[in-house]
Amino acid sequence: MDTVRLIDNEGAQRGVVSTREALALARSMDLDLVEIAPTAAPPVCRIMDYGKFKFDEAQKAKESRRKATNVGIKEMKYRPKIGAGDFDTKTRMVEKFLSDGHKVKITIMFRGRESAHPELGRKILDRIVEKLGDLARVETAAKLDGRNMTMVLGPERKARAKSETTTVTDETTTPETATPETTTQES
């Protein structure tokens, strides 16, 4: 290739110049000559610090990966004859998963003659939704799959933002609001 369309390090068009001249200009600035559009006629080249460019691209990719939310699906299994204490414990865990931003698949497992009474499983699912209230929204309604009844809950956006702000305000203690247990005495 004899000539290239040159863009300098500030992004200004330098026009069509010879390849040797473009390389000499890049070397004089202590920068690199990078071919941007090889299929154009003449090819487009840019004068830049290629190492810095690669670093900045890696930083942008890292930042976008960090901002991307990883929504996992957690699962909690219940039985139709679950006790009150077990129900409360499992439901608290479901609440924790939802507040962490995960989706939760709730499975009611039927055994033997229990599968003849799917209304018992539906009652449990309704109690879970009622107890979680505005923290969760039903993404997949309850359905019976053989011996299991499943339902998927997703975190409610408004409730999640509200819970994050309350935890921040709960953790801050000013001297006026400090209780005797939280204050320290110097001896």
Image (cartoon, rainbow, N blue to C red):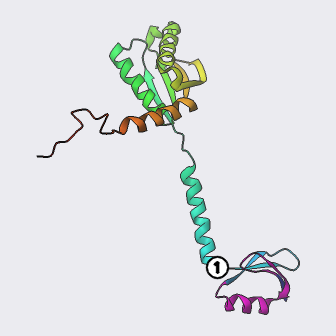
- Residue 41, x across and y down, in percent: 89, 77
Is 15 in the magenta?
yes
Outermost residue on the left side: it is 187
> Where the N terminus falls, by quadrant?
bottom right
Outermost residue on the front side: it is 176
- Residue 133 higher or lower than 41, as above or below: above
- Residue 180 higher or lower than 131, as above or below: below
* Residue in the image at 68% along x and 90% along y: 27
- Among the 4 quarters of the image, the one containing residue 88: top left
* Residue in the image at 83% along x and 83% along y: 4
Mark 1 packing: few (<14 Cα in 10 Å), some, or many (20+)? some
Q: Is residue 172 left or right of residue 123?
A: left
Q: Is residue 22 left or right of residue 137?
A: right
- Residue 181, x across and y down, in percent: 21, 34
Q: Nearer the viewer, residue 120 or 144?
A: 120
Q: Is residue 95 left or right of residue 54?
A: left
Residue kind at label 1, given as amino acid type:
Asp
Q: Which residues are magenta?
A: 6-31
* Residue in the image at 57% along x and 64% along y: 59
Taking the image as drawn, is residue 80 in sight? yes
Q: Secondary structure at mark 1?
A: loop
- Among the 4 quarters of the image, the one containing residue 35: bottom right
Task: Provide the residue designation for mark 1.
Answer: 49
Taking the image as drawn, is residue 103 in sight? no
- Residue 154, x across and y down, in percent: 56, 29
* Residue in the image at 60% along x and 77% along y: 51
- Among the 4 quarters of the image, the one containing residue 32: bottom right
- Residue 182 higher or lower than 22, as above or below: above
